[in-house]
Amino acid sequence: MVPEEIIKKIWPKVRTKHLFPELPIPKVSEGRENVALEMKDKQITINTAFYDKISHKMGVEEVVEALLDHGISHYTYCPWDFHTHLRLFREAKRVVQDKEQAKRAAGLFMDVVADTHCVKEKKTPLPELYKHIDKGKVDAVISSLYQKIWGLDLCAKEDEEVVRRLSRIPYLDKKQWDKSIQKFARVIKTLLEVEEEEDRQEGNQTNPMGEHGLDGYTLEEIDQGLRNFANQNVGLKEFKETFEDFKDELKDVGYGMEGGMGRGEGTPLDADLIYYMKLAESYSIPIKKVPMEKRGFLNPHSHCPWEIGRPFQDVDVWTSFGKIMPGITQTWNKIEGSTFGERESVPDCIIIIDSSGSMTNPRKNLSYAVLGAACASDAYLRNDAKVAAYNFSDAPMGGKAILNFTAERVKIYGVLCKYFGGGTALNLNELDPLLDAAKEPDIFIITDMKITNLGKVIGYFQNINNRITAVYIGENTYALRFREAMEKKKNMSFYNVTKKEDIPKIVLGKIKEYFRGNL
Amino acid sequence: MQNPFDDFRNHRTREREIPLDSIIQSRDRVMSQITKGYEKLLEEEVKELVWLVQYNTVIKAYTLAEKVVKEFEYKAEDIEEFCYELDSTDKIPYLITGPAGIYISALCNYAQEGEITLKLNDLKTQINLLGYRLPVGKKVAVEGNLGDFTGIGMEGGELVVEGNAKNYTGAGMKSGKVRISKNIGLHTGEWMMGGEIFVGGRVRGLGKIVDGKVYEDDKVIYPRNYRQSNAYY
């Protein structure tokens, strides 16, 4: 058993060495003897079975210190965050092509970087641990690599050519990690293939220093990592591919699962949807608030005689001479303050999105329309408003998806990401129930304006006073016609999107000289 | 009030020099020399604007490349790394496959190692002219596909390609062995004076061969009278 006292004794020393990482005191558990430690939600757990196995080969305190050094170096240096983890995985996969091999390659690379950083910068018994640890073929090669690049005798003698190639990689140069992991994966590719084959025959072998799953990250870190990854000029295809590779693990850690009790298999994670969601989160589109209603305190305005049955709290004790008696007692008449009651807030919004054949399929390429609509819905939801979605292609022929007002992001994105790819026509009658379902909702329409019943659409929008934000993708004569026809409407604003960077310029509901009564 | 940094007062960073540092320094130095040498070669060759594989141009480029690579020491891994550096065009502005192939061939021919393995499977571009003048006693094994003029003018070495090669493979080779595990293109062995070409897959067409042997899947396809030059079969 690992006595808790050893951890308690070692922990302050290790924390100081690593400049006080924000990690809770490690725990011990009876785990598998071939895995040294695990990290879940920042909690390092040392497996006693592994400890028992190795403790007769080296000092007990040294074992614990080395394991903690390894775990903490991952936390403080490599991968540091989930975004880096995804990046390294993606680069490794570019070389090895296989998902599992890429995960293994990324894991090994992170081990080499974290351990080398630790050995170079801290006083650590890690080399001693690597000397005594049981290793598979690949781990033995990594130990030989350590021997070469750390300049210490780890009693390792493996594949000299592979080790020579691996030792030329600048592991501690963060800027070169993307390139470095490609080189690393290229060199160990054959070894990984052999290992995979052996695993199939002899049962699964695991990394003795622990696997690099998603358990170590909190849901917020995963969310942030995906957001950064989506924003790092990664195309939809690549994001989708990487996301799919981690889909099961993301599900296992509970990412994307709505909280609450109940039964049912849950909503599957949709990579396209997550991509637009994460991109949209990075663009903050401002919304102009509007005065919604007069709200405020009731102020005493005038006196009236008190009658039996009227509330006592309105009695004016000063003019009633302290008596509660009909005819003598006076009560206050209260009216709503007209100057203090006006509050601005964000109305609900109907998002109308064109998914006809002339628009980009959001599941194949980055669709500015979907991204714009996603950003808009995100902006409204963040302001506690609700969003309804109307996705149309040839709506009269059934090419449409309608969602009533809701605050559920996943449902909204689900409708926005739908692609019909047919003709383009709006069924305007279907907008009426949505307009009636909320109090003067804003309208956000995003389309290329190549709508077959554009005349009717113009007529419809001319007759409503809701704030309308019209975003058109690309320039064309239809957009020009729409713009010319609607230009005089003060409740309407237009934006043109030709590139991703245009999206943040949209100000939802920004209307020139917008006064509700003057329309 | 307690100083919040008191805990760090006794902390001393311990940064020790590890062999990795010197390995990386040396690698960077060599790569910089190789790259400069290539740029020097390009400066000369770019003057001619269009690079054509002509007898004179190849000899001229190789003579210059030979002169450059003799000036520094490098290892087989440096050659492979240089191939990938060439592939990432942001670092070396222009990858002209002709001079690049000649330069890489010169690097191989003057490397200290007798046997060189180049893992080029992940290269986006295919290198032409690799194996030019490969001398006796040298073996170059390439993992990945190569371009045109693979193994031209070989002088007794062995070139093994785990992949495909394009047209004019083994053109003008004097002696040695070219082994291609997959397929090769047209004009195979054009003006070949000697040596052997072994092809694991298909040969799309033979060139005008003077002397030497060409094998397709272990069967001799040259010399054999019934096979015409560049016959498609």
Image (tube, grey):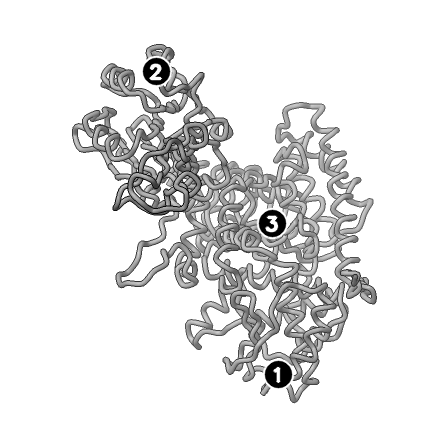
| Residue visible at 62% across and 63% down in the picture | A74
Amino acid type of the residue tagged 2 in the rendering: Leu
Measure the C-alpha gap from mark 2 to mark 3.
57 Å
Is residue B205 positioned above or below A144 on the image?
A: above
Tell me the residue that label 3 is attached to.
A178
Tell me the residue that label 2 is attached to.
A519
Callout 1 touching callout 3 (CB < 8 Å): no
Left or right, B146 with reference to B220: right
Amino acid type of the residue tagged 1 in the rendering: Glu
| Residue visible at 42% across and 71% down in the picture | A200
Q: Check the residue under mark 2 and report the chain it is in.
A: A
Measure the C-alpha gap from mark 1 to mark 3.
40 Å
Q: Position of residue A393 (x, y in %)?
A: 25, 29
Q: Check the residue under mark 1 and report the chain it is in.
A: A
First-in-chain label (2 vs 1)? 1
Q: Secondary structure at mark 3?
A: helix
Whether residue B136 is visible: no
Whether residue A419 is visible: yes
First-in-chain label (2 vs 3)? 3
Q: Position of residue A53 (x, y in %)?
A: 59, 86
Q: Position of residue A63 (x, y in %)?
A: 66, 80
Q: Secondary structure at mark 1?
A: helix
Report the mark closest to the observer, 2 or 3: 2
Within 10 Å of disc 3 (Cα), the crowding (few <14, some 14-19, many 20+) is some
The quarter of the image holding the C terminus of chain B is: top left
Tell me the residue that label 1 is attached to.
A4
Camera-side residue of A130 and B192: A130
